[in-house]
Image (cartoon, grey):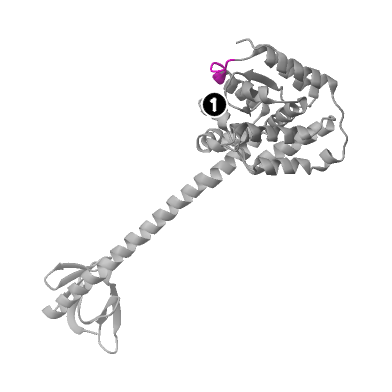
Amino acid sequence: MISNRATYYYGEEHYTTEILLLRSKLSIEIGNAGEKRTVFWDYYQIKEEGLNHFTYPGVPKQSLRITSNETAQQLSQKLRRDSKPFRSFKAAAFLKVLLFIIATLILFYIFAVPWLAGKMANSFPINYEKKLGDQLYNSMKGSFTIDEKRTASINEFFQQLKIPSKYEIKITVVKSDVINAFAMPGGHIVVYDKLLNGLQSYEQLAALLAHEFTHIENRHTLRNLFRQFSSRIFLSLLFGNTDAVSSVLVNNANNLKSLSYSRSLETESDENGAKLLAERGIDCKGFADLFLLFKKETGGAEPPEFINSHPNLDKRIENIRELSYCTQRSFTTDSALHTLFLKIQTAESNW
């Protein structure tokens, strides 16, 4: 520890003092043994003004003139050595705070915003959802080659299922080489003819439509779209601009064709769809047969968009076969649905 004398200036007053270079601060001893007091200067706030002259911030102004050149040099070295770590500490602390804020914002964007958007989708007014569904459908309709005859027949088939809904379900059959079907918010279902052509029974068609109907009725499609475009939708809803929500989704309407659902939502659609069939006396094996058809069509390759989700086909088949309302009932052929199915499959396409 180094000791030396200096003159300490405090405003207009000055004192002959003894200074001590402590580890983290400078100690300035003022007065005699009877009236001694100590002033401490933190090294990082001391400013070197010139030869042996140092100042300290505050009111009134404080300064120090050190008698010994050697002591002044040692203090100068101490200041240079101690100020760098402090600046580094401040920079490191600022960087940590900044990184924490950025990480918090990223996590909020990734997890909280999609969750909030999904919650907002559940409270989205149904009349707006129906309007949105029509806008989405109309934005895509120009790219469809629609089979009008089979579209009319498949809607007749669905109406025969007599499934109550808060939506008006409208099904469209379109020409495509892809095995796919997808639902839109508000009531529209699109079925590609390649998938429709592969169906072997009315139970399979009923299973397909019941599955897609559940996505609509339980707002799976709307919730997924809200989550997918959550940041823009969240801001629009936050400011009460539902028209902006429609604009975002309509501009990305083609995403509906490959929209995938979570494992829980797919399972919910399978199970609710099977329950709808069982309640109408339709054999739930239509679901199992539908999934077996997909396995056959893909030949073990990448699954079609309609089923490109979890759980896998084998688990979905097993799950359907274990449902109590599918195993504890006996089913008979529904002649009306069977006739309508044959009408759909034998109708001449209008393209």
For this orientation, the residue located farthest to the bottom is: 33
Say which residue label 1 marks: 253
Quadrant in the rendering for residue 91 = bottom left
Q: Nearer the viewer, residue 298 or 155?
A: 298
Q: Which quarter of the image is occupied by the N terminus?
A: bottom left
Q: Position of residue 14 (x, y in %)?
A: 19, 76
Q: Report if residue 140 lies within the magenta region.
A: yes
Q: Is residue 121 visible to the viewer in this orientation of the structure?
A: yes
The mark total stands at 1
Which residue is at 75% across, 22% downward? 158
Quadrant of the image occupied by residue 224: top right
183 sits left or right of 55 in the view? right
Coordinates of residue 69 in the picture (x, y in percent): 11, 78
Image-based side of 303 in relation to 163, left or right: left
In the picture shown, does residue 168 fall above or below 287? above
- Quarter of the rendering containing residue 319: top right
Of residues 93 and 274, the one nearer the viewer is: 274
Q: What is the span of residues highlighted in magenta in the rendered image?
A: 139-145
Q: Magenta includes 5?
A: no
What kind of residue is marked 1?
Ala
